[in-house]
């Protein structure tokens, strides 16, 4: 960095506090740092790895001491049982449909509403924005009873739209897009487009969406993960006949003598798609969460 | 704006008038579009939001004043405040409230402290820092259901991995599911496992926004790493910490999936003696097991009221904290 930093370095380095050194203004981690982080990541991964280990064993082997630490040979047999007993094929299809629809809806509606809140002038704008932010704090439990009554009356029980429609928009999404677009979309660009007589819809397509694309991708990923893992509302609105993955998983555990290895195989099936996405897009997802955090 | 250049001669007078009128019409339509487009842009959100968020929120309050059965949700019978007064006399409600509070504290406090520590470590220059960050976030991608089912096995009384590991260091087996504290610790550990990495990333993002000069001048003053952490990092992170505390508190009041599935069959009771029944579970039990939707609605509103009481308290504490060490730290 600058000369000032080098001066600071010279004064601090001789003392060499802890196990880190200041270089270029940033401390670099020492051995203890790595050790703690490796321990922590092991803790993060262990339950997942062990799910796979348990899914590859028999139920009787799981009920022995010590518990298994390495993979056995029954993984495919257990996956097959989970697939047929837990209705996992339908569950995965349903969950994918639900999560994809919710993501598309949330991203689209959040982007246009966020754009309006960030860059357009209209009456009651601040009141409506405050209302949106305030309801982010309301627990979802508060809406469940009437939603259930509504769904029952529309005879939507056990149908996917009962899960999709109530979560199709998100106050967080609107707020997130507003924060992003306030900075990422120069007001001059909109004014210039206005002077050229660009209509509002074309403005969305040619100016707003391109500018919002990075944040849209982040919001899509976050929404997808959330919708995939949603538990509270689906378990009330759906039954085992037409489940999402999370609902199906609770069904697997409800037999007279639940077969733990099959349950673990089901858990593995329900988690793998997201873990796969994490290995592919992990960096972007992490970046997105960190960016959303600073602005939110 | 869009008026064509008036270079034509006088012969094209009518033509020009026509063009002008056309331009004016287009202009008016364009203005109207500008005027109404903001409303069109927020309309889909607010329509959905009102129908499935705001209206149910208020209607829950209305329902809570009625006797409503799950068998016939349309038949509502006015009941006044009975659902609420009944709650206050119900020992299971107070039990659930206490459990929600204790589980909330023992899951949130360690989670945020650990996240802060891990974020600090991740903020050093590291090899493979992206790898650490991604791996740390994988629990976040794991569903409540999948995570809890695994933890149920890990916390098994007879053959669970946790008790086996404790046995290796000479500690007797713990009946994780049936003890009051042990079961609440086990439930909290699922929450901690899923959310620590996520919070660590949020803290890390905030740490990276702290200007380096602050550390440099602290170092010039001879502050140690620990002192820098306490006097520079933590004060700069205060808004972020407040944010995560609020979000975690809301999350804690809603705790549902973890205790439900940790309880196995009949999990809505939160264990044989309701030892880990949370308010979320209690509401589910009243509404969907005992068929009292009115009572469930009253529990939901009570949860909301509790949050409304907690937040001003938080704000008061935050305000008090800001008054004192704020001047010293910066």
Image (cartoon, rainbow, N blue to C red):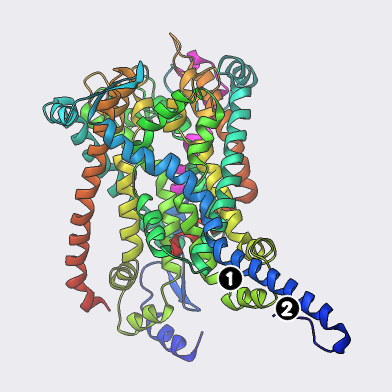
Q: Position of residue A85 (x, y in %)?
A: 57, 14
Does residue B134 lie above or below A58 as drawn? below
Horizontally, residue A18 falls left or right of residue A166, namely left
- The local secondary structure at tag 1 comes to loop
A52 falls in the magenta region: yes
* Residue occupying the point 44% across, 64% down: A294
Does residue B111 lie above or below B15 as drawn? above
> Which corner quadrant of the image does residue B10 belong to?
bottom right
For mark 1, what is the residue?
Answer: A185
Residue that sits furthest to the left in the current view: B89
Identify the mark at residue B185; answer none if there is no mark.
none
Range drawn in magenta: A39-62
* Nearer to us in this view, A173 or A189: A189
Categorize mark 2 by other alpha carbons within 10 Å: few (<14), some (14-19), many (20+).
few
Q: Position of residue A254 (x, y in %)?
A: 44, 15
Q: Determine if residue B245 is in view.
A: yes
* Residue occupying the point 45% across, 33% down: B147
A288 falls in the magenta region: no
> Which corner quadrant of the image does residue B270 belong to?
top left
> Which corner quadrant of the image does residue B68 belong to?
top left
* Residue occupying the point 18% across, 61% down: B316
**The numbered mark 2 sits on a residue in which chain?**
B
**The numbered mark 1 sits on a residue in which chain?**
A
Identify the mark at residue B2; answer none if there is no mark.
2
- Marks 1 and 2, Cα distance to the nearest angstrom? 26 Å
Mark in the foreground, 1 or 2:
2
- The local secondary structure at tag 2 comes to loop
Does residue B188 lie above or below A131 as drawn? above
């Amino acid at each position: 960095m600058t000369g000032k930093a080098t001066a600071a370095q010279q004064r601090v380095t001789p003392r060499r506090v802890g196990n880190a050194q200041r270089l270029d203004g940033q401390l670099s981690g020492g051995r203890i740092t790595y050790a703690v982080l490796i321990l922590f990541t092991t803790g993060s991964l262990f339950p997942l790895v062990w799910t796979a280990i348990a899914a590859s064993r028999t139920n009787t082997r799981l009920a022995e001491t010590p518990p298994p630490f390495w993979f056995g040979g029954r993984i495919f047999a257990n996956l097959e049982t989970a697939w047929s007993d837990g209705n996992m094929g339908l569950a995965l299809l349903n969950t994918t449909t639900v999560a994809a629809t919710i993501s598309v809806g949330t991203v689209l509606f959040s982007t246009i509403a966020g754009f309006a809140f960030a860059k357009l002038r209209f009456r009651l704008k601040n009141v409506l924005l405050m209302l949106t932010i305030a309801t982010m704090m309301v627990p979802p439990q508060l809406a469940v009873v009437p939603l259930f009554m509504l769904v029952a009356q529309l005879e939507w029980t056990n149908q996917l739209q009962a899960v999709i429609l109530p979560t199709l928009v998100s106050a967080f999404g609107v707020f997130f897009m507003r924060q992003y677009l306030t900075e990422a979309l120069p007001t001059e660009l909109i004014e210039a487009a206005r002077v050229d007589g660009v209509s509002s819809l074309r403005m969305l397509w040619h100016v707003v969406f391109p500018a919002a694309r990075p944040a849209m991708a982040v919001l899509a990923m976050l929404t997808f993960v959330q919708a995939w893992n949603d538990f509270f509302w689906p378990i009330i609105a759906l039954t085992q006949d037409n489940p999402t993955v999370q609902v199906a998983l609770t069904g697997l555990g409800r037999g007279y003598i639940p077969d733990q290895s099959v349950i673990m195989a089901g858990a593995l099936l329900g988690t793998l798609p997201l873990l796969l996405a994490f290995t592919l897009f992990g960096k972007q997802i992490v970046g997105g969460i960190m960016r959303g955090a600073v602005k939110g | 704006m869009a008026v064509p250049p008036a270079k034509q001669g006088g012969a094209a007078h009518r033509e020009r008038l026509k063009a002008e009128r056309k331009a004016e019409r287009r202009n008016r339509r364009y203005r109207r579009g500008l005027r109404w487009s903001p409303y069109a842009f927020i309309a889909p959100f607010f329509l959905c939001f009102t129908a499935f968020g705001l209206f149910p929120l208020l209607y829950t309050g209305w329902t809570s004043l009625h006797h409503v059965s799950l068998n016939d949700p349309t038949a509502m019978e006015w009941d006044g405040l009975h659902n609420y007064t009944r709650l206050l006399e119900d020992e299971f409600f107070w039990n659930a409230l206490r459990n929600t509070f204790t589980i909330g504290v023992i899951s949130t406090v360690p989670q945020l402290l650990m996240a802060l520590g891990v974020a600090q470590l991740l903020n050093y220059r590291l090899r493979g820092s992206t790898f650490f960050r991604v791996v740390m976030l994988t629990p976040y991608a794991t569903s409540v259901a999948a995570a809890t089912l695994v933890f149920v096995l890990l916390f098994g009384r007879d053959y669970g991995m946790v008790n086996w590991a404790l046995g290796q260091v000479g500690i007797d087996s713990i009946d994780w599911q049936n003890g009051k504290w042990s079961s609440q610790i086990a439930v909290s550990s699922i929450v901690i496992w899923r959310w620590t990495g996520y919070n660590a990333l949020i803290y890390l993002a905030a740490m990276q926004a702290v200007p380096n000069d602050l550390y440099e001048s602290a170092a010039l003053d001879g502050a140690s790493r620990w002192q820098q952490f306490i006097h520079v990092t933590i004060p700069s992170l205060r808004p972020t910490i407040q944010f995560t505390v609020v979000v975690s508190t809301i999350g804690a009041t809603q705790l549902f999936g973890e205790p439900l599935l940790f309880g196995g069959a009949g999990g809505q009771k939160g264990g044989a003696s309701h030892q880990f029944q949370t308010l979320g579970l209690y509401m589910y039990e009243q509404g969907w097991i005992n068929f009292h939707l009115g009572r469930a609605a009253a529990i939901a509103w009570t949860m909301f009221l509790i949050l409304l009481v907690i937040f001003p308290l938080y704000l008061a504490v935050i305000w008090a904290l800001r008054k004192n060490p704020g001047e010293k730290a910066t």
